[in-house]
Image (cartoon, helix red, strand yellow):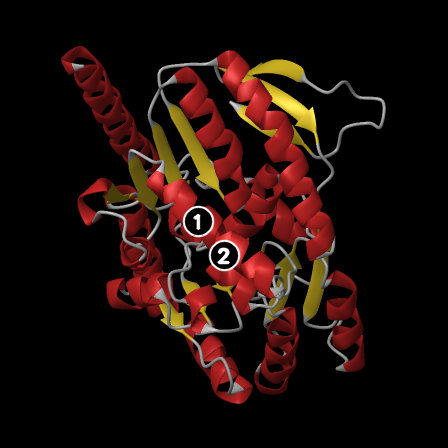
Amino acid sequence: MITSDRDAAPSAPHWRTTTEAGIQVHWTPVKYSNKMAYSERLRSFFSFAWRASRKAAEIGGDIVFATSTPLTIAIPAVYAARRSRVPLVFEVRDLWPAVPIAIGAIRNPILKWAARRLERFAYRNSARVVALAPGMRDEIVATGYPREKTTVIPNGCDIAEFTDSGEEAELRSSYEWLGNRPLLVFTGTFGVVTGMDYLVRLAAAIDRIDPDIRVAAVGTGRSFDSTRELATELGVLDKNFFLIGQLPKHKAAVWTRTADMSITMLTGPDVIWRDATQNKFFDSLAAGKPVANNFRGWQGILAEEAGAGIILSSTDIDSASRDIVAALRDTEWLASAAEAGRKLALERFNRDDLAANLGVLLEEVHDEAQSARARS
């Protein structure tokens, strides 16, 4: 595995190698943060692409598996596949460049043209493309890539990580403002497309209806300071809205397991949320927690139809707050939704099962490549 070391010291070597869960991981120091401007992120993407290209070609292998975002990951992937004369399987986790173009991160017409060319370059050089949602597959096929070579393998649920461990009661008792009160939790990046102002305004509306309900936001990002400022302005900071900050994944998981309901949010053009497959959504299912979505995308509809969640109005905060309060005060529905979410996690999105599906796909591609070589 080749990846970036985002928190490396300035004096760190160009590459270091570790073994993680039996996988040899090659790390290169490339500065990256969700707080960085998009121009800075692009520089980091291309810096990683340059270094990873040479390292991947040097390592070699039987197959190249590349996962994006960003789309620039296709550069070292294609380079390594060609140099090693092995097939490439390309996983699409977000529709780039459609998403950055939609949010205005890429505005220059020349850059837009180059990004679209890079997208088609990635697909054209891939033996298979893996999409995280059915709608993503349709968008990929619309570029001219064969449908029969496109496979949908969504994000998976880490069942073990999100099984109650006893830490939940300890967390509740350690915060005087929480205790046994109903808890709505957001975990993730405070980014532009997340729309954190929605959560703050939702908390303010909830406070007017049911001031005993608590809203906690776990994470950080470019919008952290503006989120704090708006919460202060609306008078909800440390009243019913609490900023927990960034935590290690296992600590953030405790907040998800402790919540009565989690919330996922996206804002902007429909290309951003239509086929969203957010990790926090699957974490909620794994934890057996109902999930509220403020967009009618693939994951929200999935949860609603399964009885594992609700879809909130993205524009009518008062309506959304009433729906949240009603759900959090309905103990029968909470229990039913929790069971439905856990069922989805176990039967449809079990990470081990999905990993096995990917393994079968990689073996098929490898065998096809071997057969092609034998015939030639």
Amino acid type indicated by mark 1: Glu
Tell me where residue 313 appears, x and y as whole percent. 45, 81
Amino acid type indicated by mark 2: Pro
Judge from the rendering whether residue 360 lies leftward or rightward of residue 52; answer left or right: left
Quadrant placement of the C terminus:
top left
Residue pushed farthest right? 11
On residue 97, which mark appears?
A: 2
User: Pointers 2 and 1 in contact (CB under 8 A)?
Assistant: yes
Return the residue nearer the eye: 246 or 19: 19
Q: Which residue is mark 1?
A: 119
Answer above or below: position of 46 versus 340: above
Q: Residue at x 46, y 14 (%)?
A: 60
Q: Secondary structure at mark 2?
A: loop
Q: How would you rate the neighbour count of disc 1 (Cα within 10 Å): few for under 14, some for 14-19, many for 20 or more?
A: many
Judge from the rendering whether residue 49 lies leftward or rightward of residue 260; answer left or right: right
Tell me where residue 106 appears, x and y as whole percent. 61, 62
